[in-house]
Image (cartoon, rainbow, N blue to C red):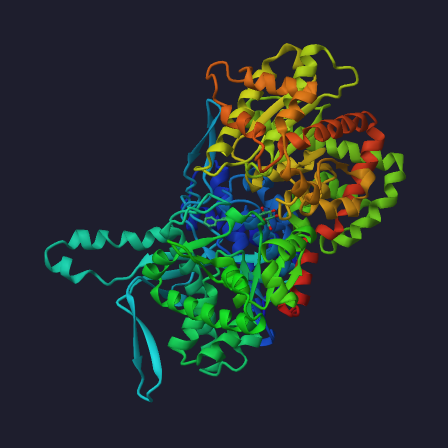
Amino acid sequence: MNPVTFTTADILNNFDDEIDRHLRITLGCHADKVDSDYLARALMIAVRDRLVQAWSNTQARQTANAKRQVYYLSLEFLIGRSLSNAVANLDLEDTIRQTLHKYGVELEEVASQEHDAGLGNGGLGRLAACFLDSCANLQLPVVGYGLRYEYGMFHQEVENGRQIEKPDHWLRNGNPWELERPDHMRRVHFYGHTEHYHDRTGRPKVRWANSQDVLAMPFDMPIPGYRNDTVNTLRLWKATATDEFDLQEFNAGSYTEAVAAKNMAEQITMVLYPNDSSENGKELRLKQQYFLVSASLQDVISNWVDRHGNDFTEFGAANCFQLNDTHPACAVPELMRLLMDDYDFEWDDAWKVTQQCMAYTNHTLLPEALERWSVGLFSNLLPRLMEIIHEINNRFLVSVAQMYPSDEGLLRRVSLIEDGEHPHVRMAYLAIVGSFSVNGVAGLHTDLLKSGLFRDFHQIWPNKFNNKTNGVTQRRWLAHCNPALSSLLTSRIGDEWITRLEKISDIRPFAEEADFRAEWRVARQENKQRLIDFVEQETGIVMMPEALFDIQVKRIHEYKRQLLNVLHVIHLYDRIQRGDTVGMVPRCVLIGGKAAPGYYIAKLIVKLINNVARVVNVDEKCQKLLKLIFLPNYRVTAMEVICPATELSEQISTAGKEASGTGNMKFMMNGALTIGTLDGANIEIRENTGDENFFLFGMDAAEVARCRENYNPDAIIAADPQIDTIMRMLEGGRFSADEPGVFSALTEGLRNPYDSWLTIADLRSFIDAQQRVNQAYKDQDAWTRMSILNTASSGWFSSDRTISQYADDIWKVQPVK
Ligand code: 26Q
């Protein structure tokens, strides 16, 4: 059959007809006045239809031509909305706007009907989404594998200042983007036991017997590249029960009970775990991890066997699995199991293949966030994997003992099994031993991995370790979310920056043109107004348009130090009370983020922000000078309104704690100035934009380490009257009149000599830096110049750059054009 080609007029007519057909036939909507929800669904289906041909072409092309395929294994993909992204990438915006005008609506209104796909917690999940976008843009043969959670990241509400979690049933109205693929269903084993036997040729073999099985049903989501005919795939697995009834129960007359028991299986992909740090070791979470890994590896191997039969000679060279943190680290023993038990590999051959195709990315330095699983739980749930892990460990320790004879301490330190009364599997060590590449996500982070957390492993295998500084996609985080700034940029330097962000440095000389700066300010003001409207809608609070927009949005965490931010707000509040306001610039401080439901202190910080906000925002004297806002339910879609309007980006973690940060990059790209510590990618942001365009404060990682040795926060407080006042207000109940003492856990933490986050140690430096911000903001022209230079220097922080480095250094893959 000949390929069909469309003229512009065809597409237009076509689109009108298609929307009409989907409304009336696909969706059965016959109303006179179509509401925007139906329109959104019709539009999404029509746009998806446009993707399908390129999607299957891409697959065919990659299967035929790619020398190596990459699989990004991640428990999280924080996609957000897809419609506007697809429309922009297919270059359909004008067409669709014309069609929608016939229904009297704007694209933005229709697009706002789409529910965020919130299948992630924060940075790590959003990074996976940016990476998929960049892979498609660069036409790389990369498939994302994840879980199709029925419930995504919880919806956050605030009652009496406290966080309330509500379920996020994002699939309730269907997901027009996904295609169910029953023909690629897989079967995953749990529980049971292993049996060692000899096959017909007398070779020793193992089988996993008496397991309880769960089916994995794949749903594919299209990942379109930017105007390049490439559409990659994100494959999400849903757990479904097998049809094997428990016959005993069935025969005893418990038919309904037997069927109901099938629900156990389906729970595996019911809900995303909403905690992004310390793990509580729940069995269901390990089930999720193994379910993802086993289904995905079987998928890859089965496709391989379809094309190559049982010849695995090239399998290791032709496939690469990138492990997004240790969450999918079971991939190491699972690949071993599949190769040995199902395809008759000998151990050494299987190990060679495994080490040839696994690569691991670490996203945290917090020792308490490193995943460990109790050996007891592990061997009960995954008996065959536990056996393989023991064998990997034994062989590894033998090789270490050969390299470093008589270093027992070393053997104990690097063992994959942490010994003790309740031994645990150290998942990070399993990932390191099983991979050919281990990378951190920013320069400092990788250095600290090598010299600290993974020091012994770095000594054993220095060449395994490498850095890949994170990035974000400028297509979502500038072109889409900031149309005002985008068209201003394009008017001066063309639109090549959309696919090659390094070109954005061409805007640098325009920082010296007064007209350009004026236009920059107009765009910024338009974006601020958009945020003002959004915040008023969500909270009822009206931000002052002339104020400095000072913003911190990210997960609520002690190490991220939202508390430090609040202490500064209290300080400003106190100054205003005392009438010390000469030269004070009006400021709106906005904080948003979710706390893990079981993280008591994080939830208390949310309460404190809300309580301080309540006092500040009703205060007469503050009206024109200061507002504090807690924005509920921070999510991808909220950031799309927030980052274009932000003037001051708060990146204030204790140095050495934030692996990279990625919000920091979105803000910079959109022209915000950063107030930050020398932590994570802040360091690289400062290097790129220049010291003079960055508000630095606080201790660096080395100073932090030294400070801990002899930290006396009480002494610092007593010696600094302004800090002393802040503490008195907090401890004296100024923000907790109706619940005396509610914040004592926070104030006691601040005064604790073992406070891990050293908040008081950095407070003076922070207040001073904020005063420098205040002074700088008074000179709007100079501020605008700095803002332009931040955007102009953001080229390095495109995820296209990051992904090119993964492709060249780790994956060794080429684009398939
Ligand atoms: C683990 C086990 C059980 C349940 C949950 C988890 C879990 C889930 C998510 C642990 C950690 C996470 C997420 C971590 C994360 O988002 N880290 C961030 O990754 C970003 C991308 O590299 C960095 O920019 C941030 O600095 C880092 O905090």
Residue 2 visible at all: no
User: Which quadrant holds the N terminus?
Assistant: bottom right
Query: Relative to 289, is 663 on the left or the right?
Result: right
Q: Position of residue 268 (x, y in %)?
A: 36, 53
Q: Nearer the viewer, residue 625 or 102?
A: 625
Furthest residue toward front: 406
Q: Position of residue 116 (x, y in %)?
A: 51, 43
Could you say which quadrant of the image residue 468 lies in?
bottom right
Furthest residue toward left: 252
Q: Nearer the viewer, residue 634 or 384?
A: 384
Q: Nearer the viewer, residue 666 or 493?
A: 666
Q: Position of residue 113 (x, y in %)?
A: 51, 39
311 lies above or below 486:
below
Residue displayed at 45% across by 78% down:
347
Furthest residue toward bottom: 201
Could you say which quadrant of the image residue 573 lies in?
top right
Residue displayed at 48% across by 72% down:
395
Q: Position of residue 385 (x, y in %)?
A: 39, 66
How many numbered circles are shown? 0
11 lies above or below 206:
above
Residue displayed at 76% across by 44% down:
686
Residue 247 visible at all: yes
Q: Nearer the viewer, residue 235 or 353?
A: 353
449 lies above or below 704:
below
User: Which quadrant holds the C terminus?
Assistant: bottom right
